[in-house]
Image (cartoon, grey):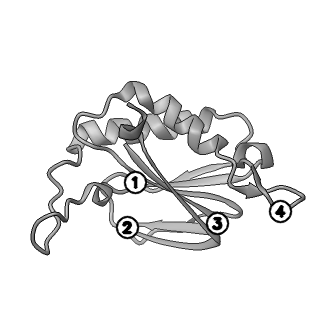
Amino acid sequence: MRAVLQRVSSASVVVNGGDPRTIGPGLMILLGVKDGDDPAIIPKLAAKCAGLRIFADDEGKLNRSAVELGYSVLVVSNFTLYGDTSRGKRPSFIHAAKGETAKSAYDAFLQELMNAQGLKDVQHGEFGADMQVSLVNDGPVTIIIDTDEWK
């Protein structure tokens, strides 16, 4: 799985032209699921994202987490994180997990974040929907987590 985390002062997603789902300070997470990803890694990934110390403490050091600060999280599924651009100019998405497998992993990730103690709110897009995402990246701080690197 791949997660792109952005520290934000605000973020929102509009799903299929509906009302915006908005957060204030916190994390924007784009989540990609790869074909063959082990669902057993989902709790560890969710805990890592929620507990990642990328917010400044009183001395300005990146030493505080979204959980510690009671911040919110916005999660959007994004199969394009597994776009393969090694050949040609059109990305291949053959390595991204398909349909129900990816949706199941995405839903499990959301549930793990919702169970994380200390998060103010967990907002999210909808798997496979047409979405428009807006955010104000604070810093900017952007971190990429690839669970394949944990093996």
x and y, in percent, of residue 18 in the image = 46, 68
Q: Secondary structure at mark 4?
A: loop
The label number, if any, that marks residue 126 in the structure image? 1
Q: From what the image shows, is residue 72 above or below residue 117? A: below
Disc on the earlier residue, 4 or 1: 4
What amino acid is labelled 2 in the image? Asn
- Quarter holding the N terminus is top left
Disc on the earlier residue, 1 or 3: 3
Q: Secondary structure at mark 3?
A: strand
Residue 58 in the figure: left or right of residue 98 = right
Q: Mark 2 against mark 4, which lies toward the viewer?
A: 4
Mark 1 and mark 2 residues within 8 Å of each other at the beta carbon: yes
Residue placed at 65% from the left, 69% from the top? Answer: 10
What amino acid is labelled 4 in the image? Gly
The label number, if any, that marks residue 8 in the structure image? 3
Residue placed at 58% from the left, 39% from the top? Answer: 48
Q: Would you name the residue on which mark 2 appears?
A: 16
What amino acid is labelled 3 in the image? Val
Q: From what the image shows, is residue 130 above or below residue 126? A: below
The label number, if any, that marks residue 60 in the structure image? 4
For marks 3 and 2, give the CA distance: 23 Å
Q: Mark 1 against mark 2, which lies toward the viewer?
A: 1
Residue 130 occupies which quadrant of the picture?
bottom left
Q: Mark 4 against mark 1, which lies toward the viewer?
A: 4
x and y, in percent, of residue 35 in the image = 22, 40
What amino acid is labelled 1 in the image? Glu
Mark 4 and mark 3 residues within 8 Å of each other at the beta carbon: no
Q: Secondary structure at mark 2?
A: loop
- Specify few, some or many for label 4: CA neighbours under 10 Å numbering under 14, 14-19, or 20 or more: few
Q: From what the image shows, is residue 121 above or below residue 59? A: above
